[in-house]
Image: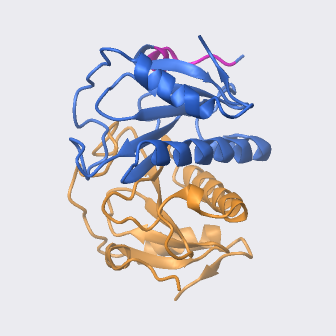
Chain colours: A orange, B blue
């Protein structure tokens, strides 16, 4: 039975579900930082998913990356499956700017998170984008 | 016309070609660290590849991750497309151990590279694995 790892649940806002993955927003206002978590049990690595799920994950990841890059006018997207601390497979999608506080380094471990004072604007902005696909179901 | 970015060519050993991607070994003996570079022009993000190429990249990435995790008895694989310094799309595949010098942090920017004194053992080890697929062509 799939359940979101409590650390991810604690650190992120749950925005909704693609057919395979939950869409999370990391509670760090320094970067537009989203995470996909395939709703499958006991999966730590992409290759452990079925071929069909891997294709769906790629589809969801590319869709998300593309709309984020466009909407946020990214200089670069950073897409990564690390999982050294939380092993449950989760794929980071981070909009990077040449002017962001960690550029050009990867963001992990650089700066303490700055929680959102008001997450509604970001939540609504992303939901208006991904909500244009019938396959995405927002969670209130 | 595809050509490997000179920074990647300088920092890595070129091991060979999958149908889509070049396989590189990063010249840092601290980690088993491999990189896939799709042989396509002017691609910075996975979503810029055609759907067919994205599927092939996923196939090559999962194949590589799986054999690396098994052969090197990884505690975790780290798979990432960052590209903040070298924008040409390249996907890191790094074998991580709980005992490695950067664990549990991501490896980028943590420690200066320690070049291989003798890369032949690692090269031969990986080529004996990926060489079992007819689709991989080693480069001498």
- The residue at the point 39 percent across, 49 percent down is B74
Q: Is residue B22 above or below residue A36?
A: above
Q: Is residue B80 visible?
A: no
Q: Nearer the viewer, residue A75 or B23?
A: B23
Q: Is residue B52 magenta?
A: no
The residue furthest right is B52
Q: Is residue B5 magenta?
A: yes
Magenta region: B2-9
The picture quadrant where one finds residue A118 is bottom left
The mark total stands at 0
The residue furthest top is B140
Question: Is A34 displayed left or right of B137 in the figure?
Answer: left
Q: Nearer the viewer, residue B13 or B86?
A: B13
Q: Is residue B111 visible?
A: yes
- The residue at the point 53 percent across, 71 percent down is A23
Q: x and y percent of residue B67 in the render?
A: 54, 44
Q: Is residue B27 above or below residue A113?
A: above
Q: x and y percent of residue A63 in the render?
A: 66, 58
Q: Nearer the viewer, residue B133 or A27?
A: B133
Question: Is A42 displayed left or right of B41 in the figure?
Answer: left
- The residue at the point 73 percent across, 63 percent down is A52
Q: Nearer the viewer, residue B49 or A89?
A: A89
Question: Is B101 displayed left or right of A53 in the figure?
Answer: left
Q: Quadrant of the C terminus of chain B?
A: top right
Q: Quadrant of the N terminus of chain B?
A: top right
The picture quadrant where one finds residue A54 is bottom right
Q: x and y percent of residue B40 in the render?
A: 69, 27
Q: Is residue A130 above or below residue A32?
A: below
Q: x and y percent of residue A75 in the render?
A: 48, 40
- The residue at the point 46 percent across, 78 percent down is A14
């Amino acid at each position: 039975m799939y359940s979101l790892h409590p650390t991810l649940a604690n650190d992120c806002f749950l925005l909704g579900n693609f057919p395979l993955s939950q869409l999370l927003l990391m509670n760090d206002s320094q970067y537009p930082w989203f995470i996909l978590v395939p709703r499958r049990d006991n999966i730590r690595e992409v290759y452990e998913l079925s071929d069909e799920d891997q294709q769906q994950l790629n589809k969801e990841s590319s869709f998300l990356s593309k709309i984020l890059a466009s909407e946020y006018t990214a200089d670069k997207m950073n897409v990564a499956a690390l999982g050294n601390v939380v092993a449950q497979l989760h794929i980071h999608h981070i909009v990077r700017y040449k002017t962001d506080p960690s550029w050009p380094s990867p963001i992990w471990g650089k700066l303490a998170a700055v929680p959102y004072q008001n997450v509604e604007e970001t939540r609504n902005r992303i939901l208006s984008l991904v909500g244009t696909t019938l396959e995405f179901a927002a969670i209130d």
